[in-house]
Image: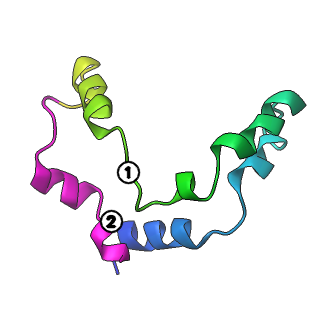
Amino acid sequence: MNAKQLFAAAAFAASKPLYHNAYKVQAGKAIAAQAPKYMTRPNMEPQRISGLPGIMEDAVKFKYIPAPLTDAQLKEALPVDALK
């Protein structure tokens, strides 16, 4: 298992919701109270990736990458198949 796969597997196995950390970064209680609405277990699944076309469009627009990634590049960068 390479480093990317190990990181993804660890993120997938994490059982504590991330919204508990909102208090640690000194977010207001009102903001922290809204976190469970958005940071649900299904939304934190590393195998669930959404919005890539928009993300790549912004990455090209702001010159983080020269062009949108090909399917092969996406499979290499985001090896979600290795988690199945």
Pointer 1: what residue?
49
In the picture, measured across the screen, residue 67 lies left or right of residue 24, that is left
Real-space Cα separation, disc 1 to disc 2, in angstroms = 9 Å
Read off the residue under disc 2: 80
Tell me the element at label 1.
Answer: loop
Dot 2 falls on a residue whose secondary structure is: helix
Magenta span covers which residues?
A: 66-84
Q: Residue at left 15%, top 42%?
A: 69
User: Residue sitting at 20 percent across and 59 percent down?
Assistant: 75
Which one is in front, 75 or 84?
Answer: 84
Left-right relation of 41 to 17: left
Please identify the quadrant where the C terminus is shown: bottom left
In which quadrant of the rendered view does residue 37 lie? top right
How packed mark 1 is, by other alpha carbons closer than 10 Å (few <14, some 14-19, many 20 or more), is few
Above or below, comparing residue 28 to residue 71 in the picture: above
Residue lying at the far top in this picture: please name it.
61
* On screen, residue 12 above or below 18: below
Amino acid type, label 1: Ile
Is label 1 in contact with label 2 (beta carbons under 8 Å)? yes
Residue 79 drawn at (x, y percent): 29, 65
| Residue found farthest to the bottom | 1
Visible residue check, residue 10: yes
The x and y percentages for residue 33 are 83, 37
- The residue under the point 31% across, 75% down is 82
Q: Is residue 32 left or right of residue 62?
A: right
The mark found on residue 71 in the picture is none
What percent of the width, then of the height, locates residue 41?
Answer: 61, 59
Residue 15 higher or lower than 19, as above or below: below
Expressed as whole percent of the image width and height from the top left, the position of residue 76 reads: 20, 60
Can residue 28 be seen from the camera position used here? no
